[in-house]
Amino acid sequence: MNNISMKNVIMGSVLAVAAVTSLSANAVTVCAGGVAGTGASFAAGTNFVKQGFTPKCSANVFMDGEEFSATVFRAGAASAKGKYYFGGSTVGGAVGNMGACAGTACAQTDSAAGMNAASTS
């Protein structure tokens, strides 16, 4: 998969989770970068999202999410085969490249860094 396609997959995943995920006030690891499968399950709540669900994770993708408030959800993602991490939030729906990964390959900490860099206001 070329770099542009991988970026589109990661950014699309971040936006999808950011648009429909309901979490507790703490950050949650949604995808752990292993094989493809199910991610963390999210229960219906009274904050950001009203319908619970379980997201699907692509292979080699790290993703973290946080319900920052009743109106703001932010997410970060990185690929184990990539060089950059991404972040975005429901504040304007923007998802973007937040920087280069710390090591020679991205890790869960880079995904969390993308989430933490996403706008909250």
Image: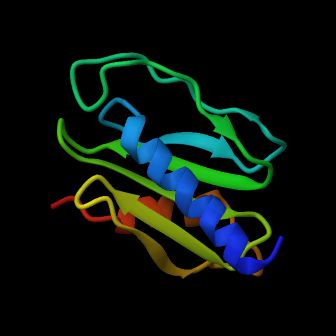
Question: Relative to 32, is 21 above or below?
Answer: above
Q: Position of residue 28 (x, y in %)?
A: 48, 39
- Foreground residue, 90 or 103? 90
**Residue 49 appears in which quarter of the rendering?**
top left
Asked which quadrant contains residue 26, the reply is top left
- Please state, as top left, top right, bottom left or bottom right, where the C terminus lies in the image: bottom left
Residue 8 drawn at (x, y percent): 61, 66
In the rendered view, would you say 4 is above or below 108? Answer: below
Specify the quadrant that holds the N terminus: bottom right
Q: Is residue 53 above or below residue 116?
A: above
Residue pictured at 77% horizontal, 81% vertical: 104
Which colouring convention does the figure follow? rainbow
- Figure disc tally: 0
Name the residue rendered at 33%, 56% in the picture.
89
| Relative side of 6 to 50, left or right | right
Residue displayed at 59% across by 32% down: 55
Image coords of residue 53 (percent x, y): 51, 21
Q: Which residue is painted at 42% across and 17% down in the image?
A: 43
Q: Position of residue 61 (x, y in %)?
A: 70, 54
Q: Nearer the viewer, residue 65 or 4?
A: 4
